[in-house]
Image (cartoon, rainbow, N blue to C red):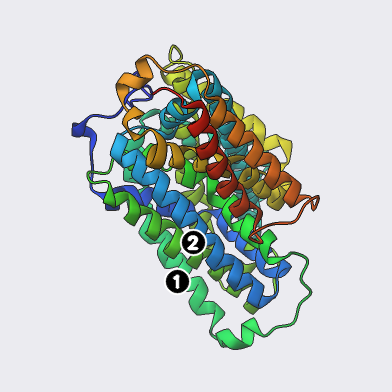
Amino acid sequence: MSENSEFSAAPITDDQLVAWPRVAAIAVMVAFSLPVFVAGLEMYHALTATDFIIALVVGSVILTLIGATMGSIGARTRMSSYLLVRIAFGDRGAAIVNLAFAVSLIGWFGVNIDLFSGAVTRLANDLWGVNWPEWPIEVAAGVLMTTTTVFGFRAINMLATALAPVLAVVTVMLLIGSFENDSLSALMALEKTATLTVGDGVSAVVGGIIIGAIILPDITRFVREWRGALYVAFWAYMVVELIVFAAAGIAGAASGKTEILDVMLHFGLGLGAFAIVIAGSWVLNSLNLYSTVLSVEATFPKLKGTLVTAVLGGLGVGAAFLNILDNFLVFLGFLAVIFVPVAGVIATDFLLIRREAYTAETLEGNQLLSVPAFGAWVAGAAFAALISNGSIGSVFGVGVLDSVILSALLYWGLAKIVQPKG
């Protein structure tokens, strides 16, 4: 990523703008990725059929609202999510929040490479009888994804535009195979024992995509008109993401399998599985690393260039060896708890408190720390964490929804008292 090419420390310029469908292609690819299929299958087996549907719809609505709000702010201001965090939280507060984002995105990078290498070795063995060690695949994948990221938004955009139709076809084929012998009503009527509540299911849906929804400004800042960001969020979270979650669950019901690769192989989609594994992981991890680089460069403006991208890519490969995948749903729940309050703070600040502050001039003389923003974020995250471990009850039945509403209300009240300067 060449210096200043991605506007990590300033709003983008008009010559960088593109039509919203091109941006939507990137967001849609995130929904087509292997982790979403995995989460959808695990959720189906952990919830009753009714609760599964409710969790999908409610979770998708929450994601769409958060993504549309954050994405439209990015499109209006032409700023990345990390610059928005700087204005809302102040430079020192943003350093903590942005570094937390970076750590989580590196964790996601590791999760996806872990999934990628395991899936490739499994498919190679099942389809061709070839036994490959995982670590060379992880290193090769890391190099490929890092190299794509070096070329920035336009390279990721071109890749996503080319590959999204392929993954859409694979998903449709999975659904068609699922209905060959059973109707939807018959599949949903299958008996099973639930191990999660609806609230847990919603948190899993939200947790799987929440970072993408909150950092949506990283790509929607390139949309020509701010309304395009609303379309991006709708198609990514209310349409494609919901369909992918549902397709994984329905296919799991029809096949009786509990592993996503077993499901795809059951329906004769070996090459389709490869397409989802390679294409989905490639685009998703390139975007994860792209956003990580923006986060680090926004926090430490002197650190720029290809070397930063390469170092962060190396850390992501290292994260693949930490076995985050062993606690996948727990990891998704953790992400929802920590990052949903950030959206509540930024949305409230921009929409109700200090819209005029979201300019390049504010960044030049920015406050060091917004106590209301930082306090509301910590309180919202702590509240959601207490709900998730059962220490207190949920007001709305979904911890992440409690969290974002609490953080928004708390920030609004504190900001009125403290009156931070823009």
The part of the image, by quadrant, that contains residue 108 is: top right
Farthest top residue in view: 302
Q: Spatial distance from mark 1 to mark 2, Cα to Cα? A: 22 Å
Depth check, front residue: 143 or 17:
17
Mark 2 element type: helix
Q: Quadrant of the C terminus?
A: top left
**Residue 101 at x, y = what percent?**
56, 33
Badge 1 or badge 2: first in the primary sequence: 2
Does the rendering let one see residue 84? yes
- Residue type at mark 1: give it: Val
- Residue type at mark 2: give it: Val
**Residue 24 at x, y = what percent?**
34, 52
Does the rendering let one see residue 296? no
Mark 1 element type: helix
**Residue position marked by numbered label 2 in the rendering:** 61
| Above/below status of 280 relative to 302 | below
| Above/below status of 366 relative to 29 | above
| Above/below status of 406 relative to 267 | above
Q: Which mark is residue 172?
A: 1
Q: Is residue 385 left or right of residue 182?
A: right
Q: Is residue 6 left or right of residue 13?
A: right
